[in-house]
Image (spheres, grey):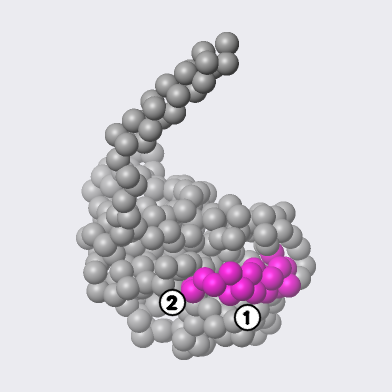
Amino acid sequence: MVKRITATISVFVLLLTCVCTLAPAVKNDGRIQIPIVMYHSVTKTGKSNYIIPPDLLEKDFAYIVSHGYTAVFVRDVVNFVNGKTKLPKKSIVISFDDGFYNNLYYAVPLLEKYGLKATINVVGSYVDAEKGKTKRSCSYSYLNEKELAAVAKSGAVEIGNHSYAMHSLSGRRGVMRKKGETEKQYETALKEDADKCKRLIKRVCGTDVKVFAYPYGSSSTSTERILRSLGYEAILTCAEGVNRLKKGDTDRLYKLKRINRAAKYSTRTYFKLLGVQ
């Protein structure tokens, strides 16, 4: 009986050895993992899927630094994929959508304190709507032109396009093609909207915008093609996941995944979702 068991084990070990020998070794294909955080509003007056308090934001930033990660701009990721530069092995992208005033009030000082960078994607019509308003609120105000310029000049922020007036669920969902709209009409509408926000950012910040963030993560089959034709080099989506990129992965730059930072998660729990631990 003992001999039979011993013989069975020997056969199993032999088969396992053969399988391991035949299986190809996993090779390093040059890809690096690039998690992207998606923040929105930072305020003391509420918590939700899109609002976190400033003390939680600081815990997040401290966690990133303490775990040896380097925050990079989206343009740094683009340059890496295009073979123009290298990235730290433990790179992370921090993004903020919509362009809230509280990003300047709370986030920029914390970025500077921890030596981090972020990409803030602004809605052009929100910036224009703040013109002439003297009362500033971390609860509901958006960046005006002067504040947007200050954010850009901080050196800690890269500005992205979040549409001019398509951050809406009325009429069309984000930058999606409307029902009954022809392809030509859609292309004209998207180009005009994206260019209007791009011109605003260029005038106020003096920078050419190369990053576009889909409002609500919505898009149509031709959206990417149209944005590429306008010179955009990367698109931030709302598809959840972690990016694994290598040099030459230019198509993947237009489908960059992010994970929304909801207030319900502790810092440790949220960053485990991103593989940052």
Q: Nearer the viewer, residue 121 or 192?
A: 121
Tell me if mark 1 has few (under 14), some (14-19) or many (20+) residues whose alpha carbon lies within 10 angstroms of its own. Answer: many
Q: Which mark is residue 176?
A: none
* Chief secondary structure of the magenta portion: helix
Q: What x and y, as percent, mark residue 88? A: 41, 72
Q: Residue at x 58, y 69 (%)?
A: 67
Kind of residue sitting beneath label 1? Leu
Q: Is residue 61 left or right of residue 121?
A: right
> Which residue in the protein does label 2 denote?
158
Instruction: Residue at 34% x, 62% y: name it.
Output: 234
* Residue type (three-letter) at the residue carrying disc 2: Glu
Image quadrant where one finds the N terminus:
top right
Does the magenta-highlighted stretch encompass residue 248?
A: no
Q: Quick one: 176 or 93, which is closer to the camera?
A: 93
> What is the x, y in percent for residue 18?
34, 30
Q: Where does residue 40 sit, x and y in percent of width and height?
A: 59, 64
Residue 249, image quadrant: bottom left
From the viewer's side, name the closer residue of 16 and 31: 16
Give SS at disc 1.
Answer: helix
Say above or below: 196 vs 259. below
Residue numbers of the magenta segment: 52-71
The residue where tag 1 is placed is 110
Look at 43% across and 77% down and name the residue there: 158
From the image, which quarter does the C terminus lie in?
A: bottom right
Q: Are circles 2 and 1 on residues that touch, CB within 8 Å?
A: no
Secondary structure under badge 2?
strand
Q: Tell me if residue 193 comes above or below residue 71 in the rendering.
A: above
Query: Percent x, y for residue 240?
Result: 50, 49
